[in-house]
Image (cartoon, rainbow, N blue to C red):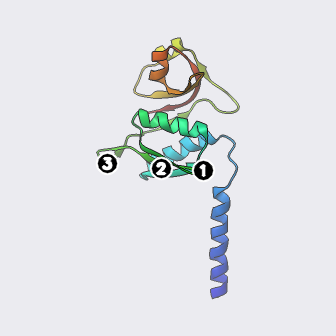
Amino acid sequence: MIRKKIQSQTQKREAKQIVKRAHVNYPVGDFLIRVKNAALSGKSEVVLPKTKLIAAVAKVLKETGFLSKVESHGNEIHVTIARYAKESALMGISLVSRPGLRQYFTAAELARVRGPEIYILSTSQGVLSSSAALKKGIGGEIIAKVW
């Protein structure tokens, strides 16, 4: 009986390691959804695999006040979700552009967008928030809408 219990614990541990190494088709989308799920479930920190695009998106989220801390440790990135009065600063994330359907906004289209949400854009000058892209007068691919 003890041997079976040890075997089942070993199998569970191996299954968790497989999940951590699973291939992700759209890493930025996976990053944003994990951050959203952590914020909505009340968790404060998320550890994710690191890519240049994920690091740039995390930097934009930190600059806009949705994340309080972004740290890089080897191949992982540790992000801490900002909290104001015990509530998460991040209320929701909606993926706009995805691998099967890319969405683009020009600077003129960005100027017409109103509301409390911000857009994260991939532009020719790097990953920017919608307000930073408007100041520079450029458009780009919309990665996500954050509020």
Task: Spot the residue most to the top.
Answer: 108
Relative to 58, 7 lies left or right: right
Helix, strand or loop for disc 2: helix
Residue, x 43% and y 37% (percent of image)?
62
**Where does the image place residue 36, in percent across and percent down from the top left?**
49, 44
- On the picture, is 44 further left or further right than 14? left
Q: Percent x, y for residue 73?
A: 53, 51
Toward the viewer: 72 or 38? Answer: 72
First reached walking from the N terminus: tag 3 or tag 2: 2
Question: Which secondary structure lies at badge 1?
Answer: loop
How far is the residue under mark 2 from the one under mark 1? 20 Å
Task: Give the residue type that dot 2 points to.
Answer: Ala
- Pointer 3 or 1: first along the chain: 1
Residue identifier under label 3: 86
Tag nearer the camera, 2 or 1 = 1
Tell me the residue that label 2 is attached to: 38
Q: CA distance from mark 3 to mark 2?
A: 14 Å
Q: Dot 3, crowdedness within 10 Å: few (<14), some or many (≥20)?
A: few
The residue that appears at 63% across and 81% down in the rendered structure is 6
Relative to 39, does residue 115 appear above or below in the rendering? above
Q: Which residue is mark 1?
A: 75
Task: Please identify the quarter of the rendering in which residue 54 is found.
Answer: top right
Q: Residue furthest front?
A: 74
Quadrant for residue 116, please give it. Answer: top left
Q: Is residue 112 visible?
A: no
Amino acid beneath label 1: Asn
Outermost residue on the bottom side: it is: 1
The picture places residue 80, in percent across and down from the top left corner, at 43, 48
Residues under numbered marks 3 and 2 in contact, where contact means CB atoms less than 8 Å apart:
no
Tell whether 102 sits left or right of 134: right
Q: Amino acid at mark 3?
A: Lys
